Amino acid sequence: MMLNRYAAIRGMQVAQTAACNRLHDIKRRLARWLLMTQDRVDSGTLPITHDFLATMLGTDRPSVSLAAGVLQKKGLIEYTRGAVKIVNRKKLEDFACECYGVIRQYDGELGWK
């Protein structure tokens, strides 16, 4: 029974992520992805490249670079080659699309953060 619940909730998370990737712009998707990643690694600095982010977000590296530049100009993140640091989590949460809150709610149903 617990395995069925886990599988159902994970399926809903996958569906939410797919819808997000289809409907929301790259800047908001990047914000969501960075928040979700920080939730899982519990670190302010994420050792990730733009190429990796492009793969995870289903876009190209130049689009990630532009989106990261916008987030950096807003004072939400700092990025250097191979690393992204979240400097204002609250504002990044406000900037991210609503999908972050939905996915986080699913995590709560699983007893995670």
Image (spheres, rainbow, N blue to C red):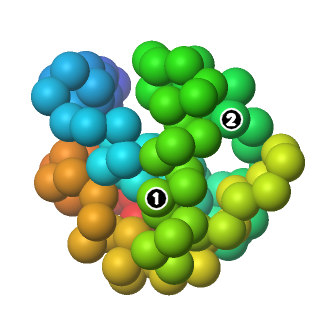
Q: Which of the two residues, 25 or 106, is positioned nearer the viewer here?
A: 25
> Residue at image x 16%, y 54%?
98
Q: Is residue 56 above or below residue 92?
A: above
| Quarter-of-image position of residue 12 | top left
Mark 2, residue position: 50
Crowding at dot 1, Cα within 10 Å, few <14 / some 14-19 / many 20+, comes out as some
Alpha-carbon neighbours of circle 2 within 10 Å: few (<14), some, or many (≥20)?
Answer: many
Q: Earlier in the sequence, mark 2 or mark 1?
A: 2
Residue 36 locus on image (x, y percent): 46, 51
Residues 27 and 100: in front is: 27
In this image, 41 relative to 83: left or right?
left
Q: Is residue 113 left or right of residue 105?
A: right
Mark 2 residue type = His
Q: Residue at x 54, y 19 (%)?
A: 60
Q: Amino acid at mark 1?
A: Val
Residue 30: image x %, image y %? Answer: 44, 45
Q: Residue at x 51, y 70 (%)?
A: 73
Displayed quadrant of residue 2: top left
- Cβ–Cβ below 8 Å for labels 2 and 1? no
For disc 1, the marked residue is: 70
Whether residue 97 is situated above or below residue 56 in the rendered picture: below
**Residue 39 placed where, x, y %?**
51, 60
- The alpha-carbon separation of the residues under discs 2 and 1 comes to 14 Å
Q: Is residue 8 visible?
A: no
| Residue 5 screen position, x and y as percent | 22, 30
